[in-house]
Image: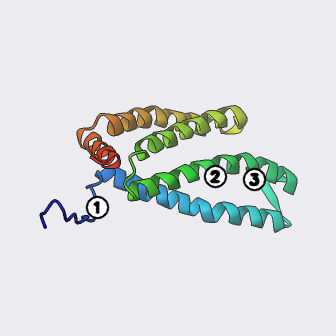
Amino acid sequence: MTDSAIRVEQPPTRLQIPFLITCGMAFMAFFAAVAAVVVPLFIVIALVSSGPFTIDGVPVTKGAFLSFSLPIFLVIVPVATLAGAFAWGVWKERAWTRGAAMAFWVCSALVSIGQLILVPDQRSEAVQGLLSLLVIVPVALWYFYRKGTVVLYYGALQARHRGA
């Protein structure tokens, strides 16, 4: 038999994941895991508890508390899901994680904008969030789409996906 007649599949080798992407994977996995535990636990406790309920130190009814909390959960769940998907995708070496990371930062900006509009009492926190995102998003864009080693990493992932 010739060498070309026998084909032995080599196990795939892991690529060297850039350091900040590894840090992002750890952060996103932690965030997603905490949200997966805390959100359902908080909802169950709020539903079965008899109180007292407060918002910013002001006593409120259970209904008012749950109504106030609902938008928070409607934001946390998809953002945490996106964070978990990013962490899993990096671990599994998926090329789409670059877009998922940028989507996470865009969602963070939308959360801050929503906070500005919907929670007037927390304008200063929302403005701080937006200002920090004005720095983070351009840096993330540069890192994921312009930094040489990261561009090479994602190029290798895409080539592997195409079977090259």
Q: CA distance from mark 3 to mark 2?
A: 25 Å
Q: Residues within 10 Å of mark 3 (few under 14, many from 20)?
A: few
* Residue in the image at 25% along x and 42% along y: 152
Which mark's residue is nearer the viewer, 1 or 2? Answer: 1
Q: Is residue 111 left or right of residue 154?
A: right
Q: CA distance from mark 1 to mark 2?
A: 33 Å
Q: Secondary structure at mark 2?
A: helix
The answer to whether residue 114 shows anywhere in this view is yes
Identify the residue position indicated by label 1 in the image.
12
Identify the residue position indicated by label 3 in the image.
57
Q: Secondary structure at mark 3?
A: loop
Q: Do the numbered discs 3 and 2 sit on residues whose CB atoms are within 8 Å?
A: no
Q: At which x and y percent is residue 18? A: 29, 51
Label 3 amino acid? Gly
Q: At which x and y percent is residue 132? A: 47, 37
Identify the residue position indicated by label 2 in the image.
77
Q: CA distance from mark 1 to mark 3?
A: 55 Å
